[in-house]
Amino acid sequence: TYVADNVYVTIDEAALFTVDLRTLVADVATGGLSFAIASASNGSAAIQGGATAQFRPFDDGLAGFTYTTSVDGTLAATRTVNFMVHNAAPTASLAGPADGVRGQQLTFTIGASDALGDEAAGFSYHVDWGDGTQQLVGPTAGNGAGIPATHVYVDLGTYTVRVTAIDNDGQASTEVTQTASVTPFAVQVDPLNPAQRVLVVGGSAGADNIDISAVCDSDE
């Protein structure tokens, strides 16, 4: 619904709010109506389908838009629709390798989406690597589009990476997760030549001796 003329309705930031402007013109003749957006604050507004206004806030706080009503091309009224915008939690994202080798640096991409104002300010990220190591990444402008986060696992096993994004208002996202299996060796895509594959072997923290030998098929 809507509220007009300095009365406020509460909505969540980044929500797309729709107003049928024809319901606000009881004191104006109904023939030959046309509408136009005059201005908007803390958001964007546009006329859709001739008589419907859509408004999307940029950030939490006060917001709204002013529109004009004309009858047969003559200005008949100017009204303001006002909003009190509540902060909404961001949505975190996490992408990266499903497996790796012990001692190998693994790179994940962490990101978040939210209202435009929060995305411009950037997000903080809390990363739990699943091996007892945690990391806090500070906010930078626009870092919701995705930034790299790297980690090295020193023990074999399957680990669950957990990421939470926090916006500039302190609102935290729902946690997102991904598992990574760490093995002693693996055949992986060659980072220098994606058309080839390479054998990657991970040692321990000790003085390892790694022997590699060819094994022939007995039928050859």
Image (cartoon, rainbow, N blue to C red):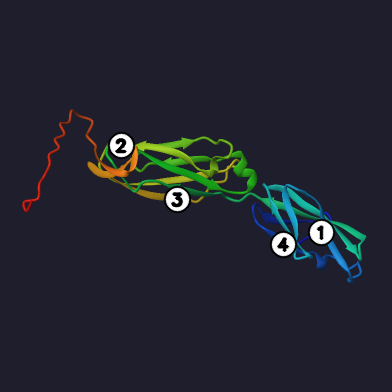
- Asked if the residue at tag 2 contacts the one at tag 1, i.e. Cβ–Cβ closer than 8 Å, the answer is no
Does residue 33 lie above or below 126 as drawn?
below
Give the mark, 1 or 4, whose residue is nearer the N terminus.
1
The amino acid beneath tag 4 is: Thr
Q: What residue is pinned by disc 3?
A: 176
Local crowd at mark 1 within 10 Å, few (<14), some, or many (≥20)? some
Measured Cα–Cα span from mark 1 to mark 4: 13 Å
View extreme (bottom): residue: 31
Q: Secondary structure at mark 1?
A: loop
Q: Position of residue 162 (x, y in %)?
A: 41, 46
Question: Which of the labelled discs sits on residue 104, or is there none?
Answer: 2
Q: Is residue 165 left or right of residue 205?
A: right
Q: Residue at x 22, y 33 (%)?
A: 204
Give the mark, 4 or 2, whose residue is nearer the N terminus.
4
Does residue 171 lie above or below 19 as drawn?
above
Q: Secondary structure at mark 4?
A: strand
* Mark closer to the observer (4, 2): 2
Local crowd at mark 2 within 10 Å, few (<14), some, or many (≥20)? some
Q: What residue is pinned by disc 4?
A: 18
Does residue 75 lie above or below 124 as drawn?
below
Q: Secondary structure at mark 3?
A: strand
The amino acid beneath tag 3 is: Val
